Image (tube, grey):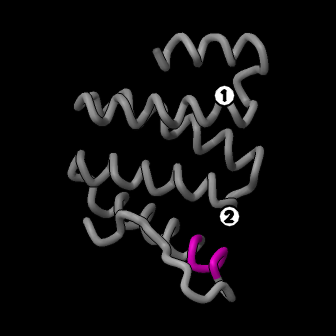
Amino acid sequence: MYRRALEGKEKAWGPEHTSTLDTVNNLGVLYADQGKMAEAEAMHRRALEGKEKAWGPEHTSTLDTVNNLGNIYANQGKMAEAEAMHRRALEGKEKAQDGRSGSHVSTGVGRV
């Protein structure tokens, strides 16, 4: 289903459109749930590269993908890479939440 949605979005809006990139990210999550870690990593890397260009490296949508990539690395046993991604996501989310009392930042950093 995500594959078909991705193909449609790529044709309609192009591969770098933020909606297309969200679908790429979601496909990565699906692959991870299916245990297809190489495919999941590839999708998250693609989504991250596109989101960094579209939104910038500190946008919360970009940071969600950074966190997802960290989860993939952790599942693959790449702990140094996982920690780097989770720290980046955590620090970015904390910065984005700065000044908002009562906000909760959720990342997978506790898993590392």
Other-residue count near label 2 (Cα within 10 Å), few / some / many at <14 / 14–19 / ≥20:
some
Residue drawn at the location 55% of the way across and 86% of the way down = 102
| Location of residue 30 (image quadrant) | top left
| Magenta-drawn segment | 93-97
Residue 90 or residue 81, whichever sits in front: 90
Q: Residue at x 66, y 11 (%)?
A: 8
Which label's residue is closer to the chain start, 2 or 1?
Answer: 1
- Residue at 48% from the left image edge and 34% from the top image edge: 26
Mark pair 2, 1: CA separation: 19 Å
Kind of residue at disc 2: Glu
Q: Main secondary structure of the magenta part?
A: helix
Is residue 94 located in the magenta-colored stretch of the structure? yes
Residue 11's spot in the image, x, y percent? Answer: 73, 10
- Residue 67 on image: x %, y %: 45, 57
Residue 58 is labelled as: 2
Q: Which residue is mark 1?
A: 20
In the image, residue 2 lies at what x, y percent? 49, 20
**Nearer to us: label 2 or label 1:** 1
Q: Up-down: is 9 above or below 69?
A: above
